[in-house]
Image (cartoon, rainbow, N blue to C red):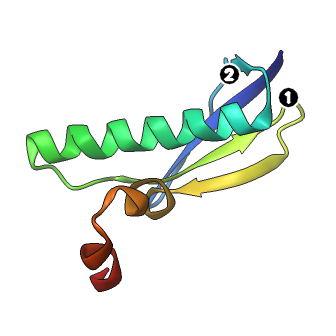
């Protein structure tokens, strides 16, 4: 198991994940970031609040950014095909 960190990028700030989570692979960590962003988007829809999170930066224990998963990258595949073309 490898520890990955999910730093949360907002418009003007970056919240550093100090604890991280263990995943069997980067692919699982990536899917964890996708899931977290979808949950954030869903919570914003429920409360009619604007989405303040733009991306989750998946980093390794050295702090190197392995991938920045954007909100668009997480949510766009969930939209019906015709709606996705409009966005």
Q: Earlier in the sequence, mark 1 or mark 2?
A: 2
**Considering depth in this image, is 1 or 6 the residue closer to the camera?**
1
Furthest residue in direction bottom, as rendered? 86
Q: Residue at x 33, y 74 (%)?
A: 84
Pointer 1 local density, CA inside 10 Å: few below 14, some 14–19, many at least 20? few
Where residue 21 sits in the image (x, y, percent)?
67, 19
Identify the secondary structure beneath mark 2.
loop
**Considering depth in this image, is 63 or 82 the residue closer to the camera?**
82
According to the picture, the residue beneath numbered tag 2 turns out to be: 20
In this rendering, position of residue 71 left or right of residue 48: right
Where residue 30 sits in the image (x, y, percent)?
65, 41
In this rendering, position of residue 32 left or right of residue 83: right
Where residue 67 sits in the image (x, y, percent)?
72, 53
Pointers 1 and 2 in contact (CB under 8 A)? yes
Q: Residue at x 38, y 43 (%)?
A: 38
Report if residue 15 is visible in the image.
no
The circle on residue 61 is: 1
Count of numbered circles in the view? 2
**Considering depth in this image, is 68 or 84 the residue closer to the camera?**
84
Placement of the C terminus among the 4 image quadrants: bottom left
Q: Residue at x 12, y 40 (%)?
A: 46
Q: Residue at x 25, y 75 (%)?
A: 83
Placement of the N terminus among the 4 image quadrants: top right
Pointer 2 local density, CA inside 10 Å: few below 14, some 14–19, many at least 20? some
Identify the secondary structure beneath mark 1.
loop
Furthest residue in direction right, as rendered? 62
Q: Is residue 84 above or below residue 59?
A: below
Q: Is residue 2 above or below residue 47?
A: above
Report if residue 43 is visible in the image.
yes
């Amino acid at each position: 198991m490898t520890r990955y960190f999910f730093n949360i990028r907002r418009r003007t700030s970056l919240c550093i994940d100090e604890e991280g989570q263990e995943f069997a692979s980067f692919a699982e960590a990536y899917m964890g970031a996708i899931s977290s962003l979808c949950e954030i988007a869903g919570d914003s829809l429920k409360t009619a609040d604007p989405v303040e999170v733009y991306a989750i930066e998946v980093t390794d224990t050295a702090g190197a950014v392995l991938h920045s998963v954007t909100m668009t990258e997480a949510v766009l595949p969930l939209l019906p095909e015709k709606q996705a073309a409009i966005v």
